Image (cartoon, rainbow, N blue to C red):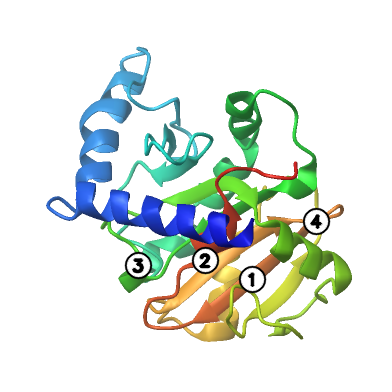
Amino acid sequence: MMRRTLAAFALSLLAIQSACAADPDALWKLVDGKCTPAARAGLEPKPCTTVDLPRGVAILKDNAADKPYHYLAIPTAKVTGIEDPAVLSDRSFEVAWDNRALVATKLGHPLPRAAYALAVNSRNGRSQSQLHIHIDCIRPDIRAALDATPPGPAWAPFPVKLDGHRVIARHIPGDTLAGINPFRLLAEQSGPDMGDWTLVAAALPEGFALIAHNDAFAHGEAMMDVTCHGF
């Protein structure tokens, strides 16, 4: 099953890269050119599912054929990615969590809190030049590792590799991410240059686990299971 999950992820990444490689601004053009103007006019914000104008974040269904339940949270302002200083005031993680139930709706049955994960890839691990937070289920092996060794309240090396990488992790309390900026918490640990970092927020039974690692092509999205198998 793990081989199938990893193979599905690899095929999905190739599909997105091939579709967007010619236009790294494809997501930005949709949000800025269609979704946001429609929302401001009081219209249905197609092709986005919703646009949260006060918090400046749009939610868009990822239409890759092998990502049936996957959604993206995208700022309505121009923010290139995790390396952009604007992420320190961005609310995309917060809005992504608030819209997580869209995954369950597409799946067709409720999901437990601990099924969800949010992820942002590094500068070189993405295909688009607009920040986007992935919303989907967490891989069962990542879930099991976090359950076996919950992270503590401060950033620290996680005792086992996740997705084959040595990572750092920390726990943050709370039922939601309201008032919490995972980017800012990572910047306090990594310094201002976060371009080579990836960041994942995985829901725990209580609070969240933030997971991060630093690599030229760091790709936290790989910790997700686009099939939501086991939930």
Residue 74 coordinates in the image, percent (x, y): 40, 44
What crowding class fits label 1: few (fewer than 14 Cα within 10 Å), some (14-19), or many (20 or more)?
many
Rendering quarter of residue 100: top right
Residue denoted by label 4: 204
- From the viewer's perspective, is residue 231 above or below residue 190? above
Under mark 1, the amino acid is: Ile
Q: What's the residue at 40%, 70% (across, down)? A: 122
Residue 93: mark in rendering:
none
Q: Secondary structure at mark 2?
A: helix
Q: Is residue 144 left or right of residue 135?
A: right
Of tags 3 and 2, the one toward the viewer is 2
Q: CA distance from mark 1 to mark 3?
A: 19 Å
What crowding class fits label 4: few (fewer than 14 Cα within 10 Å), some (14-19), or many (20 or more)?
many
Residue denoted by label 3: 84
What crowding class fits label 3: few (fewer than 14 Cα within 10 Å), some (14-19), or many (20 or more)?
some
Q: Is residue 100 left or right of residue 152?
A: left
